[in-house]
Amino acid sequence: MRMGRVSRRAFAVAALSAFTMTAPASAAPGRGGGAPVSEMRGMWLATVANRDWPSKPGLSAAQQRSELLTHLDTAVRNRLNTVIFQVRPTADALWPSPYEPWSQYLTGTQGKDPGWDPLGTAVEEAHARGLKLHAWFNPYRVAAHADPTRLAASHPARRNPGWVVAYGGRLVYNPGLPQVRAFVEDAMLDAVARYPVDGVHFDDYFYPYPVAGETFDDDAAYEEHGGGFPDRAAWRRDNIDRLVRETADRVKEIRPGTRFGISPFGVWRNASTDPAGSDSRAGVETYDDLYADTRTWVREGWIDYIVPQLYWNIGFAAADYAKLLPWWAEVARGSSTQLYVGEALYKAGDPAQPAAWQEPAELSRHLAFAKEHAQVRGHVFFAARDVAADRIGAMARVVADHYGQPADPPR
């Protein structure tokens, strides 16, 4: 998911490069002998940089709406039951927000009214099709560039320049400022108050992914707010923990029954770093690099579900799907947090990927392997454009092998 899902892909590629340089009610076949079960069958619908939707900025409202409904219909056709729709890609909004400007990915101009309500329409039309709609927010990303003057004049980041850090050629909100955390929660939860969304969803962006040779400048915030912590890393992790706990509490207060989930990068820590970590050699570890203690969130039950991005094939040496999935299953064992698995459909048939991804059956093998682990309650596919294109038939193979009947998402 990352920029957005463009940058989710970019970061996945970067992470893999780092791996190599430094060595994310129905009858379900194979479960319970045909006993009725429920499972998550989701897809991400990314809007950042027009990754999945709209196909380009500046389309008419009618064209945008038509494309959106086509994606929902594609989900139904593939017997999916949940769409995770990115509605706040870069500190902006795909609904009429009183906090932040309209997204530039709609009209091409940040702050320009597109003439309709994409989130309101998505919720209504998803529900009409029997789909759940989870609203996907990026808490801290402000822009894919480092020039504040390119933001809309009314943008909160321009009105509060002290909230913003330039890092890696991008602008991000500083997670170490309590006023930033309060603001981004208010901005995101406005959508939850307005619409009957079935879920609230964060992806893997908390503190930004490391950029070689650059330092994230939060010295002033650390000096003011970091007292009582053993080091800056512990303080940063507490900042993200607070965001997660507070968002969870506020979602339950505003709209009881709406679920809160997160889809982090797929490696918490390598076992070489921490004996509790996974048998992997990842170049990125969320605990140390993004200050996201994803294991604790699951074990403490702070979130309703987690979707680790296990974007690697079975047998990949640095991060083997067949080793990471059992690790996550063990983390989820006995917790109240449901485990789904993020699947890299976008890699299937990409000639730049390893040979395993040229096999249409690779993803189907993932689902078959997951059925051996009771803690895995479903899968989410990245992303909508790839579900629709299905360039080598990998999604069709998943549907044929595993989605013979419709299924409701877990309750």
Image: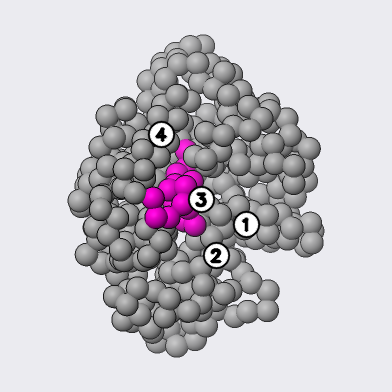
CA gap, disc 4 to disc 2?
A: 35 Å
- Does residue 8 appear in this view? yes
Q: Position of residue 31 (x, y in %)?
A: 52, 18
Which callout, 4 or 2, points at the residue further toward the start of the chain? 4
User: Which of label 1 and label 4 is nearer to you?
Assistant: 4
User: Which quadrant would residue 233 be assigned to in this image?
Assistant: bottom right
Q: Which residue is mark 2?
A: 290
Measuring from the top left, give residue 327's x and y in whole percent: 61, 43
Q: Nearer the viewer, mark 2 or mark 1?
A: 1
Q: Is residue 46 magenta?
A: yes
Give the main secondary structure of the magenta stretch.
Answer: loop
Give the position of the C terminus as an image quadrant.
top left
Name the secondary structure under disc 3.
loop
Among the two numbered marks 3 and 1 on one chain, the one whose residue lies closer to the N terminus: 1
Q: Specify the amino acid type for callout 2.
A: Leu
Counting other residues with Cα less than 10 Å from the Cα at mark 3, is it few (<14), some (14-19), or many (20 or more)? Answer: many
Q: Return the disc, 3 or 4, that comes first in the chain's sequence.
A: 3
The residue at which mark 4 appears reads as 70
